[in-house]
Every structure is written in structure tokens, then in C-alpha cells.
Image (cartoon, helix red, strand yellow):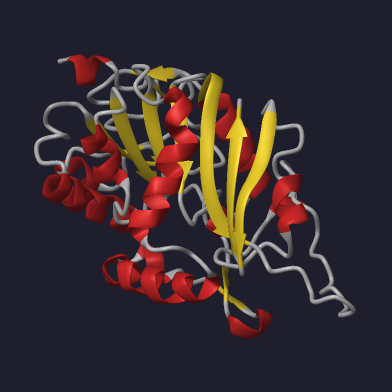
């Protein structure tokens, strides 16, 4: 099928060796021996688990009110994945996020330059599939890949696709992959577009994630992202102390999941040297920030 042919090439997240579908995650990597596919529940729904077994690169502490953290991330549990849509509407609404219809419309406008060109789209940190079915049903993309680190979110995204874009998984117009954003299991220049809605503040190493997004985007490809950053202080008020700047390597790149960026400048610093030709801030409302980056 045309959709199946357009599916992006998969690669070992540990060494970069190409992996053959459909059994990409059912054996150790033949090149480096990395163990993949530890989550049998994902295989049962036709998803690929391409996080190396025992790997913790995609795991970080989770921000709590008051500045403390916890190692327990509720969104990596089944009940957390079920509650996420309600959390998103309520908490993100207070943060300045528009409703889902409006947010999808904004993302669609950002991605319009590459829509309808036969390109594939990566819905990165897709969560329970809030936007994935809409991207598939739009007909703008030859293939849509939904990707998240949480196996529970990938499972929920599968249900969302079957409800909102029936038959798209079986027809090869969509696929599901569990992956770490800092080590994406896709070949270079696999996608014409990458979307990450309400996501970057949840990435343990946001600068490394942005660099990976640039790597998997083709030349001229577009990255559409929304996230949260603390608003600028009122005139005359003192700014909060900045956290360590993001970096690609080392512990200085760590970021507590769910913690807003300290300001827009810290967010934009993640894009420095990543390989994008342009980065623009398209909207700011309270803590809500929307960015377009062109490869």
C-alpha cells in the first residue's frame, strides 16, 4: 500500500543500524546487540517498542508544586494515561493553552508549507493521541507516526487512532512507536514535519531532543511545538533565578519532567546549534508558548 511504503525507516536507537520492519523490535540489534521490544503489550497492538531494555535516558524526575520532584511519573501508568485528557484541558487551560480544536488549527497552519507534499509526519510525545487521528484524517501526510516514551500513552494512542481514523494502522497510513526523544529510532531526514504539542517541558534533555528532531527532519522540514515557559516578570519585579542552561551532553542537560522553562530565552537556547535555519515564537499567552522551527 502507498501508506505502508511511506512509513519511515527505523534504526537502532543505540547504534543507528537500520532495522527491518515488521520485526524491528523482536530481537537484539544485529549490529550492537541492544535489546529492544521489552513491552509485549505494545507488540500485541502492532506498536514498536524501540527503547533499549533497561535504558533510563528517557526517564527523569517529575516536577512537583513548590519546586520539589518525584521519581514517579503518573503519565507512564495506565491510569495516568486515562486521566491525561482531563488534566490537559484543565491545567493547560489555566496556563493559557487554547482548546484542542484551536491548537490543532494553529499546528496545521504552521505545518502548511510542507503539507500535501507526500511527506511523513512524526507526532512526537503524542500522549494518548490527542492530535494523531486528526493528522491522519486530514489527508495531508503520506504517513503519520505517533511516538511517546510512555508505553501506556502509546496504547491509548492506538485506541484513539482506531476511534478517530479507523483502519489507518492496518492500512499502513499510521504507525505507533515507543521511543526516547533524545535517541529517536528513525533514519536521518525521515520526516517532512514533526509536531510536539505540550511536550518539550516534559523532555528530560530538551536540547538533545531538539537536535534529534532536526536530524530526522528533511531539509526544509517544519517542527511545530507548543510548551510552557514562565511568563516574564512584571515591570519592576525581579526575575526568578535561572536554572542551568540546557546542553546536549552531561547532567547539565537534565530537566525535571513537567517543569516549565524558566523563560522563553531558556526554551530558545535549546535550538541553538541544533541545525535549524530559522526559529520563531508564534504565540505567547500566559505560560503557553508556540514555536515554529524550519530545518
Residue at (9%, 36%) from the top-left corner?
Answer: 167
Residue 257 position within the rendered picture, expressed as x and y whole percent measured from the top left: 56, 63
Q: How many marks?
A: 0
Q: Nearer the viewer, residue 132 or 56?
A: 132
Q: Residue at x 48, y 31 (%)?
A: 13
Query: Where, by quadrant of the figure, is residue 241 drawn?
Result: bottom right
Judging depth in this view, the residue of 169 and 276 nearest the camera is 276
- The residue under the point 20% across, 52% down is 160
Q: Is residue 74 visible?
A: yes
- Near-viewer residue (249 or 223): 223
Q: Quadrant of residue 234?
A: bottom right
Which residue ends up furthest to the bottom in the rendered image? 66
Residue 139 falls left or right of residue 73? left
Q: Can you say which quadrant of the picture contains the N terminus?
A: top left
Viewer can see residue 33: no
Q: Residue at x 24, y 29 (%)?
A: 139
Q: x, y percentage for residue 273?
A: 76, 32
Query: Left or right: 96 with respect to 84?
Result: right
Residue 193's place in the image compared with 107, above or below, is above
Q: Nearer the viewer, residue 7 or 49?
A: 7
The quarter of the rendered structure image containing the C terminus is: top right
In this view, 285 is above or below 29: below
30 w.r.t. 202: above or below: above
**Where residue 256 appears, x then y in whole percent?**
62, 64
The percent position of residue 212, horizontal first and vertical second, equals 58, 33
The relative height of residue 39 versus residue 219 in the rendered view (above or below) is below
Amino acid at each position: 500500500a502507498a501508506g505502508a511504503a511511506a512509513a519511515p525507516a527505523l534504526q537502532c536507537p543505540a547504534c543507528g543500524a537500520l532495522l527491518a520492519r515488521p520485526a524491528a523490535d523482536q530481537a537484539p540489534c544485529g549490529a550492537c546487540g541492544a535489546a529492544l521490544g521489552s513491552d509485549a503489550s505494545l507488540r500485541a497492538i502492532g506498536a514498536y517498542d524501540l527503547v533499549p531494555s533497561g535504558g533510563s535516558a528517557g526517564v527523569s524526575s517529575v516536577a512537583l508544586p513548590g519546586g520539589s520532584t518525584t521519581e514517579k511519573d503518573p503519565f507512564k501508568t495506565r491510569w495516568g494515561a486515562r486521566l491525561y485528557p482531563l488534566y490537559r484541558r484543565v491545567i493547560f487551560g489555566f496556563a493559557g493553552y487554547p482548546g484542542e480544536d484551536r491548537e490543532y488549527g494553529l499546528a496545521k497552519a504552521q505545518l502548511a508549507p510542507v503539507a500535501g507534499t507526500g511527506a511523513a509526519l512524526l507526532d512526537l510525545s503524542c500522549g494518548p493521541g490527542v492530535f494523531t487521528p486528526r493528522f491522519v484524517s486530514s489527508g495531508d501526510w503520506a504517513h503519520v507516526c505517533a511516538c511517546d516514551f510512555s508505553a501506556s500513552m502509546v496504547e491509548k494512542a492506538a485506541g484513539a487512532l482506531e476511534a478517530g481514523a479507523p483502519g489507518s494502522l492496518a492500512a499502513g497510513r499510521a504507525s505507533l512507536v515507543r521511543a526516547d526523544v533524545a535517541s529517536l529510532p528513525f533514519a536521518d531526514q525521515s520526516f517532512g514535519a514533526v509536531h510536539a504539542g505540550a511536550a518539550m517541558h516534559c523532555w528530560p534533555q530538551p536540547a538533545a531532543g531538539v537536535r534529534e528532531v532536526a536530524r530526522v527532519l528533511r531539509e526544509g522540514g517544519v517542527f511545530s511545538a507548543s510548551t510552557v515557559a514562565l511568563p516574564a516578570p512584571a515591570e519592576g519585579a525581579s526575575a526568578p533565578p535561572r536554572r542551568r542552561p540546557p546542553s546536549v551532553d552531561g547532567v547539565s542537560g537534565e530537566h525535571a519532567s513537567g517543569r516549565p522553562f524558566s523563560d522563553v530565552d531558556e526554551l530558545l537556547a535549546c535550538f541553538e546549534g541544533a541545525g535549524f535555519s530559522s526559529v520563531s515564537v508564534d504565540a505567547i499567552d500566559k505560560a503557553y508558548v508556540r514555536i515554529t522551527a524550519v530545518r
